[in-house]
């Protein structure tokens, strides 16, 4: 599905006569994002598909096909990323557990008058709110 969108986007961009950088500027995107999407390395941002179709001056039917293909490409990439996302979530949970365990120690340091970096104060306040 991602390839179908890539080919469709490339054809519409070519037909528009716009260079990637000009298209990106008009679409409120960046040229590297456009290049990654065209290269099949990134899925199109679903929230931008309507704007992209407008910039390409697509007919209603073309826009529907373009948006459907873009949403499908994005969903396919998200599904493929699932195992990586779950692994990252587990690592973040582990880091949160470590941070939560450190809060009592940081509070003791703070109470004893040891000056802590401002970011640690912010972390302590955030941890207190969670508990």
Image: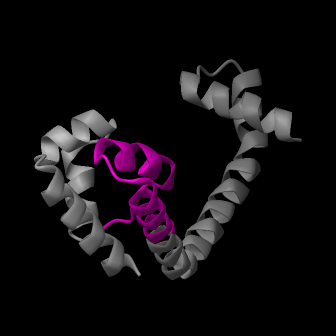
State how many labels appear: 0
Q: Residue at x 62, y 61 (%)?
A: 92
* Boundaries of the magenta span: 42-71
Q: Nearer the viewer, residue 105 or 39?
A: 39
* Residue 72: percent from left, percent from top: 50, 73
- In the rendered image, residue 58 lying in the magenta stretch gets the answer yes
Question: Colour scheme used in the picture?
Answer: one colour
Q: Residue at x 45, y 54 (%)?
A: 60
- In the rendered image, residue 131 lying in the magenta stretch gets the answer no
Q: Is residue 118 above or below residue 20?
A: above
Q: In the image, is 3 to the left or to the right of 90?
A: left
Q: In the image, is 120 to the left or to the right of 6?
A: right
Residue 124 falls in image quadrant: top right
Q: Nearer the viewer, residue 90 or 35?
A: 35
Type of secondary structure dominating the magenta stretch: helix
Q: Residue at x 28, y 48 (%)?
A: 56
Q: Nearer the viewer, residue 71 or 101?
A: 71
Quadrant housing the N terminus? bottom left
Q: Is residue 82 above or below residue 120?
A: below
* Residue 123: percent from left, percent from top: 66, 34
Q: Is residue 56 above or below residue 94?
A: above
* Residue 131: percent from left, percent from top: 89, 41
Q: Is residue 53 above or below residue 42?
A: above
* Residue 30: percent from left, percent from top: 25, 42
Q: Residue at x 72, y 58 (%)?
A: 97
Q: In the image, is 4 to the left or to the right of 79?
A: left
């Amino acid at each position: 599905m991602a390839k179908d969108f890539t080919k469709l986007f490339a054809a519409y961009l070519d037909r528009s006569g716009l260079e990637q950088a000009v298209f990106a500027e008009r679409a409120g995107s960046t040229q590297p994002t456009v290049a990654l999407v065209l290269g099949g390395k990134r899925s199109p941002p679903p929230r931008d598909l309507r704007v992209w179709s407008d910039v390409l001056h697509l007919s209603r039917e073309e826009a529907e096909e373009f948006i459907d293909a873009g949403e499908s490409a994005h969903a396919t990439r998200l599904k493929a990323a699932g195992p990586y996302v779950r692994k990252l979530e587990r690592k973040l949970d582990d880091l949160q557990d470590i941070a939560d365990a450190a809060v009592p120690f940081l509070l003791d340091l703070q109470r004893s008058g040891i000056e802590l970096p401002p970011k640690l104060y912010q972390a302590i306040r955030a941890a207190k709110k969670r508990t």
